[in-house]
Image (cartoon, helix red, strand yellow):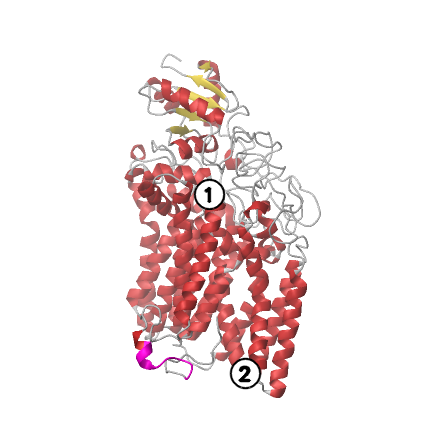
Amino acid sequence: MAITATETTTTSASEPPSSSRSRRPAWLFPSDQPGWARPGLIAVAALAALIFTWGAFHTAVNNFYAADARSMSMSWKNFLYGAFDPAGSVTIDKLWGFLWPQALSVKIFGYHAWSLALPEAIEGVISVLVLYRLTRRWTGRSDVALLSAGLFTLTPIVAATFGHSGLEDNALTMCLILATDAFQRAVNQGRLRSLALCGFWVGMAFQTKMVQAWTVVPVFALVYLICAPHPLLKRIWHTAVFGAVTAVASLWLMVIVTLTPAADRPFIDGSNGTNSIFNMVFVYNFTSRFGSLTSSGSSGSGTPGGSDWGKLFEASFGSQIGWLYPVAVIALVFGLIKCRRKGRANGVLAGYLMWGGTLGITALAFSAGTIPHSQYMTVLAPGLAALSAAGIVAMFQAFRDDDRLGWLLIAAIACTVGWATKLSYENTVFLSWLPPLVIALGIASILLLVAYRLRKIGKVLAVGIVLGVTAMAATPAAWALSTFDTSAGYNGTNINAAAGPYSGQFGSASTTGGRSGGALGGSTGGFGGGAAPGGSSSSSGTKGGFPGGSTSGGPGGSSSSSSGSSSTGGAPSGTFPGGSSSSSGSSESGAVSGTTGGMGGGGGSMPGGSGTSLTTAEQQLLTYLKAHQGSAKYLMAVMSSGDAEDYIANAGASVLPIGGFSGNNGYPSLAAFKALIAKGELKYVLISSSGSGGGMGGSSSSSTSAIETWVKANCTTVSYGSTSSGTLYECTSSS
């Protein structure tokens, strides 16, 4: 990641003769880049691949999404419509495009933990490579591009997110980087084809994370209108085409689902009983999360999922994404000042406006909304890395050339080191030796840079900038590399990506309740397993790996109960998959029991369990059901997606999830359920010991409750061995 003064392809004294250079492979030493650029990129990509694959292969599988990926791999109809169960009865409660790569991987390689994880790691490496390409095109410099790729790779939330399987944010981030790459080419050259490609990638991002993908659209449109090298009317025409392509690429799947008769496709979960995919996308997953600042799940500072405007600057999210905030902001100011006299149609100006705009609008949306998972922050990482890298190199050049704006480099180093120290000392149990080292490096860097201004000694300048970059990047790099320490839980949980000691605070820790991998059990409160930041988790003490590492919650305090509910469904109010109730889950069955709090306060297993094999009790039940299924379409019905996911993910069993994930989707109705019994398509119903699952809404729907009541009153209990999985009922046409 060397910082060079100019980008040149001429032969220097230190380089081999041109005849020797011509014999070097062009793919490794392209003629338009310095000799170190491509090998450096390969090294960064290899590091990214190592980090991402290590995490992906050492993080517990999220069985909720694994079940969906396996079901989608079983038929092309399930693949298109995102069926959660093999019979294609119900979807998941969000668009399922992010699971297409996993479903294809399972279809090709079979169902394994590694076949689920492989696509996520590949998406991360693609993101690194494309970020390098677009940053190099934007600035014209390989050193900026290589530095941006390195900073992106070593961002804690990036290392953790791409080291997980079954997260929407992996594919979302990749698609938005690809969209940005196409946009950067379009705005530089005024190419309509590239702008249309940008719209296509935004649409693909929409398939992965719905409306969040559209946060870049107004910024892209405005920057193109300002900076594209065309007359105004042509710019307007191009922008209109971009909007049309984005709309088509975003909505085509929703239109297909809507036009398909309800009887010929799965029921839409998360639609609040309407069976409308538009309701699921724009109401359940958008307005309920980001439409207001109200949230019952958090009111305190620093609690994930809260609606406080400063959440991105607090320890919980800041430790995952925020280490480069100061240098990125200073770099943006520096870049805009330097571009102010270069005219409207300027690619460098367009880049600064684009990165600043997309970061600003996304951060504003996150600040205003309810953020239940730290991996949401991943989309901020490309912009922060690109701005920081461009600013560091440009400010270094200005400082070397005696430009007054060059003093912003010292300000950037000082502010970034100070901010990192603040975040670090909010996590005093983790890497306690690092903040003093970073402070020393920062001070040494500043002194050397000032000394250069006085004496003009080139080596002093070189050492000064190297120490400065190291001081700014050391802490996030250490947090990112902590994901290798899986024994301490520093790579997050099966439902939440987070690096360092905050891993267990956005979901269940690997030592609390649930099944292997720590799926669902844990302490009280809306955030399953681990306490909210500032509280303690159910296990404490240091473990191997990084000095001072601890699996405890955060410095000081204790966990607090936080339960969210919604009488009419919609998105979670302060809770999310894996949120625990007042009692921890059974280590044998993987179910979560309890009566209040968290998702699914009505009981039942919550979606998001982990483990790649059935428990002994589950296997006993599965064996019994297969022996007695006969010609029935479904092996059994259960009262929530959480009760179905283990059997679908680990056995490919055809299980009907009554009520779906949300617990209130109204599918099937009692009449439709009775019809399944009468036609012999369903014989067995499993009701967990704690009753029907309440899902995100906190209580089961009237339809789910009515079915449970009818089953208990009209069907016969069956003994199948262990009862830890729940009570099994046999229903016949005469029931």
Q: Secondary structure at mark 2?
A: helix
Residue 520 in the image: state x and y as whole percent: 55, 36
Category of crowding for the residue at label 2, using alpha-carbon neighbours closer than 10 angstroms: few (below 14), some (14–19), many (at least 20): some
Q: Measured from the top left, where is residue 379 in percent x and y?
A: 47, 57
Which mark lies nearer to you, 2 or 1?
A: 2
Quick one: SS at disc 1? Answer: helix
Q: Which residue is mark 1?
A: 284
Magenta residues? 13-21
Q: Nearer the viewer, residue 617 or 559?
A: 617
Query: Residue farthest to the top?
Result: 734
Q: Quadrant of residue 272?
A: top left
Q: Which mark is residue 400?
A: 2
Q: Position of residue 251 (x, y in %)?
A: 34, 50
Percent x, y for residue 611?
Answer: 48, 36
- Above or below: residue 404 compared with residue 597: below
Q: Amino acid at mark 1?
A: Tyr
Hey, which quadrant is residue 564 in on the image? top right
Q: Is residue 94 magenta?
A: no
C-alpha separation, residue under disc 2 versus residue under disc 1: 53 Å
Q: Amino acid at mark 2?
A: Arg
